[in-house]
Image: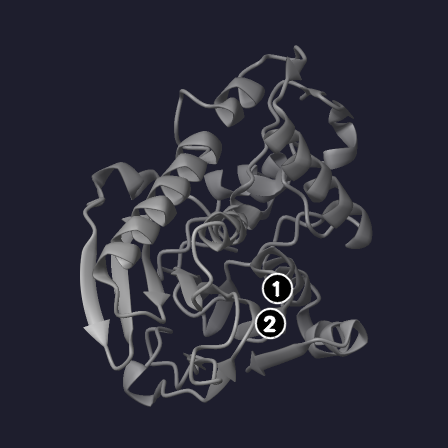
Amino acid sequence: MAGFSAIQSAMSHDLQFKSGPGFRSAHFQAMASPCELLLDSDDPALVEQLARTAQDEALRIERKFSRYRDDNIIHRINHARGQPVSVDPETAALLEYADHCYRISDGLFDITSGVLRRVWHFDGSDRVPDAEVVETARQAIGWPRVDWHPPAIRLPEGMEIDLGGIGKEYAVDRTAQLLAQQTGASFLINYGGDLYVNRPRQNGHGWIIGVEQPGQHTDSGDINLASAAGESFELQQGGVATSGDARRFLLKDGVRYSHILNPLTGWPVWDAPHSITVLAGTCTDAGILATLAMLQGAGAEAFLDAQQVKYWALR
């Protein structure tokens, strides 16, 4: 899943600008990811203005919703020791969306499942946790145990929420809304591989999007990037998001453990594609569809077929 990271504070927040054939781009770091804005314009002042808007919004969302900070709403909710916490409208909207995702996924998408990171460390090693340890962590999972009556939320002690599963995609869509208020030019927002394009470019075409192929895995379980050349497609409008286990996994006794965890069992999802990329109307919708598909395991493609969306599933 996409998410916020503890290393964000160490990343450079400087903007960098480049130009290409018929467009200009700006680059920065946020949410532990490389972020970029491509604008179908040769106006350097405009791209700088929009880039600063994008950077400010990405960093605002990171500060507000990162679970690694001790000065935001997520920290207050997770450390309320069983007491209710009133939240602002933006946080309430995200919690409502998470509640919706929980219900439509029959519990497979659960924002209380972040506690599993305490026992699972997907660093490419063979350190698979003991079943007893996993089960202990799983006891702290369960969105239905959360008392959520907008605008107040109350967690039982020992539980926590994490909005990282929808945060980066939400940041892309929020940024797109702000940029659309400032320009009618075509732009592409790319936050760590989660994308949105607002309209076709001046030449009538879209932006070319590459879909990374997992390639062949080496003996260590990592990706052979030399064989990771993927296909591409033209995107004129919409959001694109990818979920996969290409770089975060464990490997033990020849078994590869995906970082996609089933909150109902506490264990990795089996037989899921290595990567799923989905095209939808918004980046948030694309992201949740990709995540829910991964959680279906062997049924990922059937799930996406039923949603009637364009997708790329790479096994």
Residue 91 percent across, percent down from the top left: 60, 31
Q: In the depicted view, which residue is nearer to us: 188 or 200?
A: 200
| The disc label shown at residue 286, or none | 1
Residue visible at 52% across and 55% down? 1
Measured along the vertical axis of the image, is residue 61 above or below residue 280? above
Residue 97 percent across, percent down from the top left: 70, 43
Q: In the depicted view, which residue is nearer to us: 99 or 122?
A: 99
Q: CA distance from mark 2 to mark 1?
A: 5 Å
Residue visible at 36% across and 45% down? 53
Question: Quadrant location of the C terminus?
Answer: bottom right
Regarding residue 31, the answer to whether it shows in the image is no
Counting the numbered discs, the total is 2
Q: Quadrant of residue 285?
A: bottom right
Residue 10 percent across, percent down from the top left: 21, 40
Mark 1: secondary structure: helix
Circle 2 residue: 278
Measured along the vertical axis of the image, is residue 71 above or below residue 191? above
Side of 286 relative to 10 (left or right): right
Residue visible at 77% across and 71% down? 307
Q: Amino acid type of disc 2?
A: Val
Regarding residue 200, the answer to whether it shows in the image is yes
Side of 166 relative to 21 (left or right): right
Q: Are marks 2 and 1 in contact (CB under 8 Å)?
A: yes
| The disc label shown at residue 247, or none | none
Q: In the depicted view, which residue is nearer to us: 215 or 61?
A: 61
Q: Earlier in the sequence, mark 2 or mark 1?
A: 2
Side of 49 relative to 138 (left or right): left
Q: Quadrant of residue 151?
A: top right
For the rendered model, the colour scheme is one colour
Q: Amino acid type of disc 1?
A: Ala
Q: In the depicted view, which residue is nearer to us: 14 or 265?
A: 14
